[in-house]
Image (cartoon, helix red, strand yellow):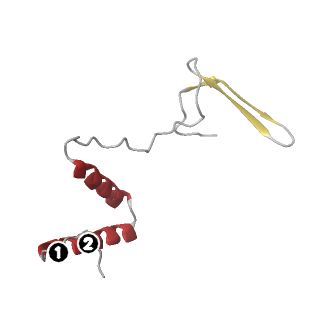
Amino acid sequence: LYLSNLHGSVDAQRCSHRVKSDMIIVTLGKSSAGNWASLEYKVDKKKPPPETPKDDPQAGIMNLMRNMYEEGDDDMKRNINKAWREAQDKQSAGVDPLEEDD
């Protein structure tokens, strides 16, 4: 039995196994004392929120859009690009991009 990415190191001399009619019991002996939250070591994949300057209210929105783009699938990226392009086109034409189209 080989397990990778364990929460801590295991002492092979202190490990054992027992075979019963309906199960196998595997006991692992830790190399050092302490409690493990789980058998496998898990990396927290959630990113901390980016720091935004307090004086620029649009920085938070831009960071949110950037994160959505970086973590989104192809459809999400396509929709963000389309919305951005339409807003830029309206702005260059002198129309407020936040106004509703009739």
Amino acid carrying mark 2 in the image: Glu
Q: Quadrant of residue 70?
A: bottom left
Relative to the observer, which residue lies in front, 26 or 76? 76
Relative to the observer, which residue lies in front, 43 or 72? 72
Q: Residue 54 placed where, x, y %?
A: 23, 40
Q: Residue furthest bottom?
A: 102
Q: Residue at x 18, y 75 (%)?
A: 90
Relative to the observer, which residue lies in front, 57 or 12? 57
Give the total number of marks visible in the rendering.
2
User: Which residue is the site of mark 1?
Assistant: 95
Amino acid carrying mark 1 in the image: Val
Marks 1/2 in contact by CB < 8 Å: the verdict is yes
Q: Residue furthest top?
A: 33
Decide if residue 86 is on the left or right side of residue 24. Answer: left
Quarter of the picture holding the C terminus: bottom left
For label 2, count other residues whose C-alpha is less than 10 Å away and answer few (under 14), some (14-19) or many (20+). few
Residue 48 vs 62, above or below: the answer is above
Residue 9 vs 4, above or below: the answer is above
Q: Residue furthest right?
A: 21
Q: Residue at x 60, y 40 (%)?
A: 2
- Quote the CA–CA distance across marks 1 and 2: 8 Å
Decide if residue 45 is on the left or right side of residue 93. Answer: right
Q: Which mark is residue 77?
A: none
Q: Residue 73 placed where, x, y %?
A: 40, 65
User: Which residue is the site of mark 2?
Assistant: 99
Q: Residue 82 placed where, x, y %?
A: 28, 74
Q: Residue at x 30, y 43 (%)?
A: 50
Decide if residue 53 is on the left or right side of residue 27. Answer: left
